[in-house]
Image: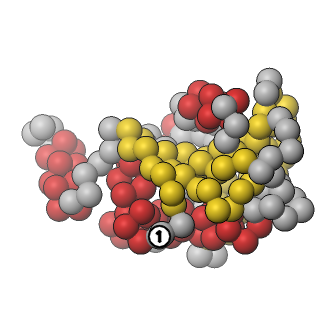
Amino acid sequence: RGKQGTERGFTRNLITYASDGLTIYGFMDTPTGSGPFPVIIVLHGYVEPSQYGVLTYTTRYADALARAGYIVIHPNLRNFPPSDEGADVFRTGMTADILNLIAIVQTQGGQPGLLAAADPQHIGLWGHSLGGGLALRVITISPLVQATVLYAALSGDEQRNFDYVYRASAGQR
């Protein structure tokens, strides 16, 4: 599902998709032209959920990638408004949201609809901080991702992440 807006060199749609019974919101930038275009899923870092919105700081990266000829999908993962809240023990729910989005691109890419210009055989991830840690998980699980950029990613070691977050929340960096 989407709501269309046109930007210079690409079209932006506000989107929703289903993931484990939840509704996940986000946006998608599609380059001008007929495609097929490779797809990059841009994963946001942690921002206090009460201060988070659909069009986040990642728009500048997404827009540049769209102008360079990539379809860019940015999901607001579960527990980041306006997406639904849901279980996310050790961020397994957010990982499922990304894997479910990849499955949608695989099945709907090249078909009539918002993903008509998408090349479902060429999917990449770009993850910042929390999103980088999630990208590490996804590429460990899924062979469908051909390229990944980690930008100031969390560690792949969940104990280390937990210890850091615990210390940071206690003011003990």
Q: Quadrant of the C terminus?
A: top left
Taking depth in this image into account, of 153 and 94 the one nearest to the observer is 153
Report the residue at 63% width, 70% height from top.
Answer: 103
**Horizontal placement of 146 versus 63: left or right?**
left
Q: Find residue 30 and report its horizontal and vertical position in percent.
A: 76, 42
Q: Find residue 12 and report its horizontal and vertical position in percent.
A: 77, 38
Which quarter of the figure has residue 141?
Answer: bottom left
Q: Is any part of residue 69 visible from this angle?
A: yes
**Horizontal placement of 14 versus 70: left or right?**
right
- Residue that mark 1 sits on: 142
Q: Residue furthest right?
A: 112
Report the residue at 56% width, 31% height from top.
Answer: 61
Report the residue at 45% width, 50% height from top.
Answer: 148
Taking depth in this image into account, of 120 and 1 the one nearest to the observer is 120
Report the residue at 55% width, 46% height from top.
Answer: 42
Secondary structure under tag 1 reads loop
Taking depth in this image into account, of 9 and 99 the one nearest to the observer is 9
Q: Amino acid at mark 1?
A: Ser
Q: Find residue 84 and report its horizontal and vertical position in percent.
A: 60, 61
Q: Is residue 47 above or below residue 162?
A: above
Q: Residues within 10 Å of mark 1 (few under 14, many from 20)?
A: few
